[in-house]
Amino acid sequence: MVLHSFGYPEPEIFGFFYVHPGNVASAGIFVPSWFDSPVRTTYRYLQHFLLHPYLWRYLEGGRLRSWGAKTLNEAGRRGEPHLVGDGWARIGEGSGSTNVLTGSGVDEAWTTGTQLGEAVLELLREKKPFTKENLEATYVRRRRASWLEQESLIAEKSRDGFHRGIVAGMLGMALAGFSHGRLHIPGAPIEHMPKLEDFFSERIPRCARRRDPPRSCRERQAAA
Ligand SMILES: Cc1cc2nc3c(=O)[nH]c(=O)nc-3n(C[C@H](O)[C@H](O)[C@H](O)COP(=O)(O)OP(=O)(O)OC[C@H]3O[C@@H](n4cnc5c(N)ncnc54)[C@H](O)[C@@H]3O)c2cc1C
């Protein structure tokens, strides 16, 4: 069984549930980093997801064999950092290669590695040093001229619609896919994660928000 979910428990959360031979299953969720509540953690979302009756009927009574967490750079091209400098270059997902429209990251990561490998060989052949300028002229030039760049431009804004909800998100992806990136549904992430103190500002007395609250405040808190 292969099950993918969209929009549960939040519009921007994707989930998966794969059943393997021997009564083994793997399940997980993708949680964006820009959610506004510091108390709704990925862990809690995962619990919520697993307890959905559709999944729980398979999972109840099971034993956790292993677990893991991984950051996935779904900013794609928008999350592209500086690619090269004097004596270094970035490849793979950390270099913004992952395609957020197709959900593909492996081929892209390999391709950037290959492109850097070819660039390094070219520089070695020409006896040129690995300067920022030379790496730009070889590695970055290859990357910009390749299918990777073309596809990442198509994908760049494809998921923006999810900031408005699941329907807008799905429509936005379809629009971007069918129009080769010419159309998309706009949307912007919440820019900041509030601090716990700010999030609960109405419940926490002003004096208690200080790093070292005065004694009178601590006593009031303890009595409350
Ligand atoms: C749940 C999930 C499902 C996915 N499904 C797909 C899919 O179906 N198709 C697809 O194409 N892509 C998929 N992806 C994306 C794909 O896995 C990644 O885009 C791809 O693995 C990126 O490859 P990478 O080599 O750049 O980075 P990674 O595979 O992340 O490799 C980085 C490695 O560096 C190691 N590392 C980190 N820091 C250090 C350090 N300081 N020193 C030494 N080592 C370090 C890490 O342990 C890791 O092994 C999925 C990702 C996730 C999380």
Image (cartoon, helix red, strand yellow):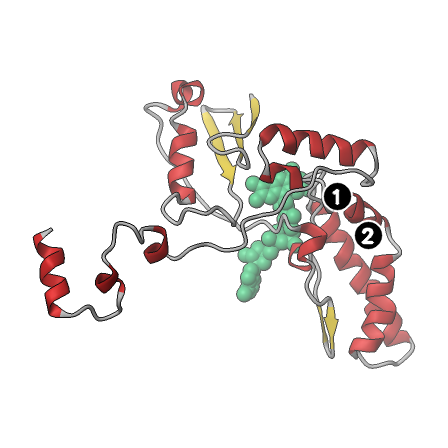
At horizontal 86% and vertical 74% (from top left) the residue drawn is 123
Q: CA distance from mark 2 to mark 1?
A: 10 Å
Residue 128, given in percent of the width and then of the height, sits at 87, 80
Total tally of numbered discs in the picture: 2
Question: Residue 20: percent from the left, percent from the top?
Answer: 52, 26
Residue 157 shows in the view: yes
Query: Residue 186's mark?
Result: none
The foreground one among 98 and 80 is 80
Which residue is painted at 47% across and 28% down in the image?
25
Q: For this view, does 70 lie left or right of residue 214? A: right
Q: Which residue is mark 2?
A: 149
Q: Is residue 218 left or right of residue 36?
A: left
Q: Quadrant of residue 195?
A: bottom left
| Residue 173, horizontal then vertical, whole percent | 71, 34
Looking at the rendered image, the quarter that the N terminus falls into is top right
Name the secondary structure under disc 2.
Answer: helix
Please provide percent x and percent y for residue 51. Answer: 38, 26
Q: Is residue 70 above or below residue 65?
A: below
Along the line of sight, the residue nearer the viewer: 118 or 153? 153
Give the class, few, some or many, for how many residues have Cα within 10 Å of label 1's Cα (few <14, many ≥20). many
The residue that appears at 35% across and 27% down in the rendered structure is: 62
Q: Which residue is mark 1?
A: 155
Q: Quadrant of residue 116?
A: bottom right
